[in-house]
Amino acid sequence: MADIGPCYFVIFGATGNLARRKLLPALYQLEAADQLHADLRFIAFARRDWQAQAWREHLGAVLREQLAADFRDEIFARFADRFDFVQGDLREPEAYRRLMDELSKPRPGVCENIVFYLAIAPAEFPEVIEQLSRIGISRAHGRHRIVVEKPFGQDIESARALNAGLHRHFDEDQIFRIDHYLGKETVQNLLVFRFANTLIEPIWNRNYIDHVQITLAEPEGVGSRAGYYDGAGALRDMLQNHLMQLLTFVAMEPPAILDADALRDEKVKVLRSIRPIPPDAVDSHAYRAQYASGQVGGKALAAYLAEPGVAARSTTETFVAAKFYIDNWRWRSVPFFLRTGKRLAESYALIAIRFRHPPQLLFHEAGAAHIDPNWILLSMQPMECMHIDLHAKEPGLGMNTRIVRLNASYRQAPSTTMEAYKTLLLDVIEGDRSLFLRFDEVEWAWRVVDPILRHWSRSRDYIATYPAGSWGPREAARLFERDDQYWRNEI
């Protein structure tokens, strides 16, 4: 069946934090890039008792704040004209009837495809899905698309319940589970880097790679998200989804063809091959901590417990590091070290692949027991780049070596980039599901972290801390297996 482009894009939670920070700016930038069909209209659904003009003023204020110098009045006028506003509570049946009235207005052509973007708390997903079904929005009425944000549940049981609720009314190919890290060009380029280069793929295995590190560091604190974050923590918020997805891209086998299901089949194989962590071994495979007060550039930073909305005795982790093994032919015995945290030293997203030492050290002076290893570094932020660290001879009479860097970055100035959210939203509109998650991916990721969650749920009386503005707790280094292994904190 040929794909039919959407005629409406409905945003539930249009005045919320996610819509303000990510969704509305990304849609505006798609408008600016002329990527939106002329007939596509947006409906903002929110509780506020507004008319269309009040929504337009709010939309303008949000975009000016988020986009700053990139805001253009003429583009905003065009973008804002696409919007209608529907006021209502998510639990109010009458609000959905008002929504249906908007969706039923006469328009050119046949409207068989509507995008419903759930920019709301995951706990509210089931209510919205049920209400949409009551007004006639389901798999039996058009090829509508439901976009849901992570986290997909709080554990494996709640994820299964959420999935069952979605599938009561929509088919799997109508559900778009969005993970914005998969829209980053560096992640997509990793597939090309591996599978289009005979130089790289033959050494991408246990015979040559010592270990893999994946780091997602955030300098910001919990901010206004304490209501959500204090019940989730870094493990649920970041590791179970973003980090685990990046791991699958690094470790997957080449797909038979480059389509959505073939890609996801290979990612699921990786997740199914991750060695289960025994309950009595969690402490040797995972470490958690919470940020205390600190300073950056002379500015004092509050501790997590001092943030507005955080429970006074909270033991929610704001930092997590974990070690996993993939028990398959390619990766047997190669550790994958994953870490993420808030209030770390800088904004930093890096996949770092460290290679084994050569079997004999020929080119250092007699007695030298150490030589810096080779690395492949794939950075997603603060810059998108790929580097390879290799050895070359130091200038002079001796035969010592030094590290030189090969720049394998694909972006050439002044090339432009499309921010990850824009990429994924365009895929939603076009019906391309390649970079969205299938439920078995979500389920197996929960299975991987479930032993850690269960162990930590029984240990809620104490949590270690680290200074805000640091690279996290030093004790996270205990996950490494040798003294010459260390966290890579720079590109």
Image: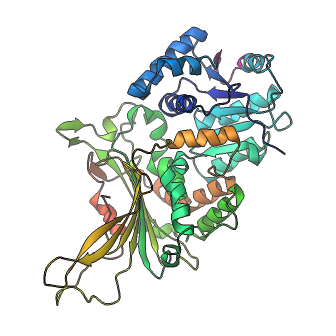
Q: Is residue 380 above or below residue 81?
A: below
The x, y position of residue 405, in whole percent, is 31, 66
Tell me, yes or no, whether the highlighted magenta stretch contains residue 429: no
Q: Quadrant of the N terminus?
A: top right
Residue for point 43% across, 35% down = 226
- The image position of residue 362, as x and y in percent, is 26, 89
Q: Residue furthest right?
A: 140
The residue drawn where x is 47% and y is 82% is 207
Quadrant of image for the C terminus? bottom left
Residue 167 visible, this orientation? yes
Q: Between residue 42 and residue 2, name the one nearer to us.
A: 2
- Image coordinates for residue 46, horizontal then vertical, percent: 60, 20
Horizontal placement of 122 versus 71: left or right?
A: right
Horizontal relation, residue 80 to residue 43: left or right: left
Residue at (73% x, 42% y) in the render: 166
For this rendering, which residue is in front, 293 or 328? 328
On screen, residue 147 above or below 455: above
Question: Is 89 within the magenta?
Answer: yes
Which one is in front, 66 or 178? 66
- Picture quadrant where residue 117 is located: top right
Q: Which residues are magenta?
A: 84-95
Q: Percent from the top left, x then y, of residue 248?
A: 56, 62
